[in-house]
Amino acid sequence: MTTITLVRGDITEQSVDAIVNAANSSLLGGGGVDGAIHRRGGPAILADCRKLRASLPHSRLRSSGGTPIGKGLPTGQAVATTAGELDARWVIHTVGPVYSQSLDRSALLASCYRESLRVADELGARTIAFPAISAGIYGWPMDDAARIAVQTVRATETSVDEVRFVLFDERAYEAFARQPR
């Protein structure tokens, strides 16, 4: 049975088999958790991301006019790279959905957790650290993000022994703490 734990802190300081990165679809780094993981993990993560990006089929990335603008990882999917200088073996990159009041994208958010656990199982990871995917710059309301995250992890069959939610601030920690584990 998978144990779900909560930690208030910095995900880049976790000692686990796999750290989940709330990545953008380019896989080339960015802000928030994504930027922190790339900075702390060093250039090996970016090098692996570039190789992965080159191997991905053309995705649905489009300009505002509908023109294809390149390759990327589709929302809700997950892939793994080295963890570089992090105290982990792998970084699992997943692209969370941007929150919308008019479109229900909760299935895509749940997919981020399921797909990350699937990749962790393929790698043989026994411990994994997740951030609150999509609850930062992508605007997902924290209470709903916490509900989807915990429910999805509880409902997903996995060989992972410990799922650790690493929450950056007290507000996020409290939202996750309110969820039945």
Image (cartoon, rainbow, N blue to C red):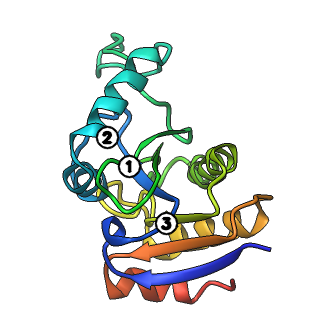
* Pointer 1 residue: 83
Viewer can see residue 26: no
Q: Position of residue 164 (x, y in %)?
A: 54, 73
Q: Earlier in the sequence, mark 3 or mark 1?
A: 3
In the drawing, does residue 124 fall left or right of residue 84?
A: right
Circles 2, 1 touching at the beta carbon (< 8 Å) = yes
Q: Residue at x 75, y 59 (%)?
A: 159
Q: In the rendered image of this protein, does residue 151 appear above or below residue 171?
A: above
Q: CA distance from mark 3 to mark 1?
A: 10 Å
In-front residue for pair 87/92: 87
The quarter in which the N terminus is drawn is bottom right
Label 2: which residue?
A: 45
Q: Dot 3: few (<14), some (14–19), or many (≥20) neighbours within 10 Å?
A: many
Report crowding for label 1: few under 14, some 14 to 19, many 20 or more residues within 10 A (C-alpha).
many
Q: Quadrant of the C terminus?
A: bottom right
Q: Amino acid at mark 2?
A: Ile
In the rendered image of this protein, does residue 53 appear above or below residue 128?
A: above
Q: Tell me whether circle 3 and circle 2 mark residues in contact (CB < 8 Å).
A: no
Point 29% across, 19% down: residue: 63
Residue located at (23% from left, 45% from top): 30
Q: Residue at x 61, y 66 (%)?
A: 148
Establish if 169 lies above or below 109: below
Q: Which residue is mark 3?
A: 16
* Foreground residue among 59 and 78: 78
Number of numbered markers: 3
**Of the image marks 2 and 1, the number of the one nearer the N terminus:** 2
Amino acid type, label 1: Ala
